[in-house]
Image (cartoon, rainbow, N blue to C red):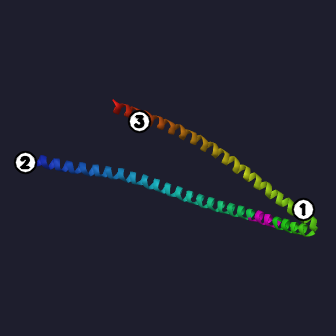
Amino acid sequence: MDWVVFASCFVLIFSTIFDIVKSIKDKKELSDEHKTLRENHQSLSNEHIQIESLVKEEVQNTKHIVEKDNLQILSIVNNIDRTLIKELERNNIYHNNLTDGQRDIKHHVESISALMKEVERLQSQSINQQKEIKELTQENSELREQLAQYQKQTQTYTNDFTQGLNL
């Protein structure tokens, strides 16, 4: 029995030593893997910080460009406003300097121009109405043909029915 106890103790001690060695090896592997993950995390954190700073810089640049463009647009609009005001003033001065006859002529020219626009609008409307008339005429003739066919069928059915009664 001593050999059995001795063998059992030997196996127990050997298994324990084996488990300890295996645990030490696994711990080293996990430690190396943890170190690699920490380095990757640090690298990603640095990349994130760099990307964040680039995005902030781009936002600032874009904001500056938009503000500059807005100022240019505002300047252009102001110039247009000034030009329109000057043009209105010139037109008022021009209109005030016209004689009564010239004012009448100007009024008649404006009336003729408005009349020509109305004629163009009416011509366009007339063309559209002519197209609509053609479409409605076509639809009307198709419906008349269908009605004639239905009447013919009805007459045929009526004749067949009456002949059937007469027999």
Tell me which residue sits at (35%, 31%) in the image: 166
Give the amino acid type for the residue marked by disc 2 in the picture: Asp
- How far apart marks 3 and 2 lie (CA) works out to 125 Å
**Front in this rendered view, residue 129 or 111:** 129
- Other residues around mark 3 within 10 Å, as few (<14) / some (14–19) / many (≥20): few
Residue at 50%, 58% (x, y): give it.
45
Give the side of residue 50 with respect to residue 157, left or right: right
Callout in the foreground (3, 2)? 3
* Amino acid of disc 1: Ile
Residue found at the far front of this picture: 166
Reading the image, the residue beneath label 2 is: 2
Q: Position of residue 108 (x, y in %)?
A: 86, 61
Along the polypeptide, which appears first: circle 3 or circle 2? 2
The residue labelled by disc 3 is 158
Q: Which residue is mark 1?
A: 105
Q: Position of 162 compared to 82: left or right?
A: left
Prevailing secondary structure of the magenta residues: helix
Mark 1 or 3: the one toward you: 3
The residue nearer to you, when weighing 113 against 17, is: 113
Q: Quadrant of residue 110?
A: bottom right
Q: Earlier in the sequence, mark 1 or mark 3?
A: 1
Q: Nearer the viewer, mark 2 or mark 1?
A: 1
Check disc 3 and report its element: helix, strand or loop.
helix
Q: Is residue 77 magenta?
A: yes
- In the image, which residues are magenta? 74-82
Q: Quadrant of residue 117?
A: bottom right
Percent x, y of residue 10: 16, 48
